[in-house]
Image: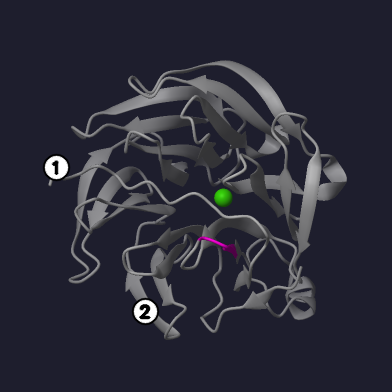
Amino acid sequence: MEVFNLDVPLSVLGEGPVWDACRQCLWWVDIEPGLVHRYMPSTGQYRMLPAGDRCSSLVLCTSGNLMLTLKDGFAELDPVSGAKSYLARVEADLPENRFNDGKCDPAGRFWAGTMDYRNGVTGAGKLYMLNHDRSVEARLSGITCSNGMAWSADHTVFYYIDTPSREVAAYRYDRATGNIYDKRVAVHIPADQGLPDGMTIDSEGMLWVALWGGSAVARYDPYSGKRMAVIELPVSNVTSCTFGGEHLEDLYITTARSGLSAHELSQQPLAGAVFVCRSVGVRGEPAIPFLDSTD
Ligand code: CA
């Protein structure tokens, strides 16, 4: 399948792509400089918002605002004015930790996990859930590099990637409480295919996983664990993906320059680009917004 890079600046650590169906645009972040990016495919219009503080993921809100994970907290961002305000903090006592990937669950709660970003200490992170009342609950502990998440369309399964495990884990999920339990390994990724990073689910219930160091996004069947398709990219560090476009038929893919040597960067001039693979043959599921308004 053919991929094209968008005409947007290269990211140091591009992450967290989200398709905004209301605005018909793609949002993503660049964690290292703490930037929020927006691209509108119909016009080619590009815009950047400085969020700071190692902004690592974003979700849409029912109010029209964006919710972000910053280094040690959840914050709301007004995309028009750029005003930002913290809603909840975590791990203030762990200066080596920062938030990483995040996404909303089917009930509109914001899930995001942490990692030791200085030394990659094993098991130093946790997976958190931000409730509608802004309270925060830890859902998993002993996490090393919290990354991709997805929920099944019937809201009974939560898929999760702790990158060094080389696995996509599947948990039973209780929508009412947000409880997860009965972990099983849905997909195992061999060492020579890269490390699993961000992830999205399609309308057939299959998982699309970005492979850091693997120069690809691959589609997996979480029931058999089999790899169904591969989209190859001209850069090695592929970070995340999401479906976008009017009918959610295009796959948008973020990548990174970080982790590459000067020589590797010279060999991969598009490292850090956002790519799109048009009409991959299956549609995605709409992004679930954070429920921050009742109207
Ligand atoms: Ca990631």
Mark 1 Cα shell of 10 Å, populated few (<14), some (14-19), many (≥20): few
The region drawn magenta spans 248-253
Distance of label 1 from label 2 (alpha carbons): 29 Å
Rendered location of residue 9, percent (x, y): 52, 80
Q: Do the CB atoms of the residues marked 1 and 2 lie less than 8 Å apart?
A: no
The residue beneath circle 2 is: 47
Task: Give the farthest residue toward the left.
Answer: 295
* Looking at the image, residue 184 lies above or below residue 272: above
Left or right of residue 73, residue 202 in this image: right
The residue beneath circle 1 is: 294
Residue 41 visible from this viewpoint:
yes
Task: Indicate the quadrant containing the N terminus: top left, top right, bottom left or bottom right.
Answer: bottom right
Rendered location of residue 40, percent (x, y): 42, 77
Rendered location of residue 197, percent (x, y): 63, 47
* Looking at the image, residue 145 lies above or below residue 71: above
Amino acid bearing label 1: Thr
Residue 69 magenta-drawn? no
Rendered residue at 75%/59% (across/down): 216
Element type at mark 2: strand
Rendered residue at 14%/42% (across/down): 294
Q: Nearer the viewer, mark 1 or mark 2?
A: 1
- Considering the whole magenta stretch, tell me its main secondary structure: strand
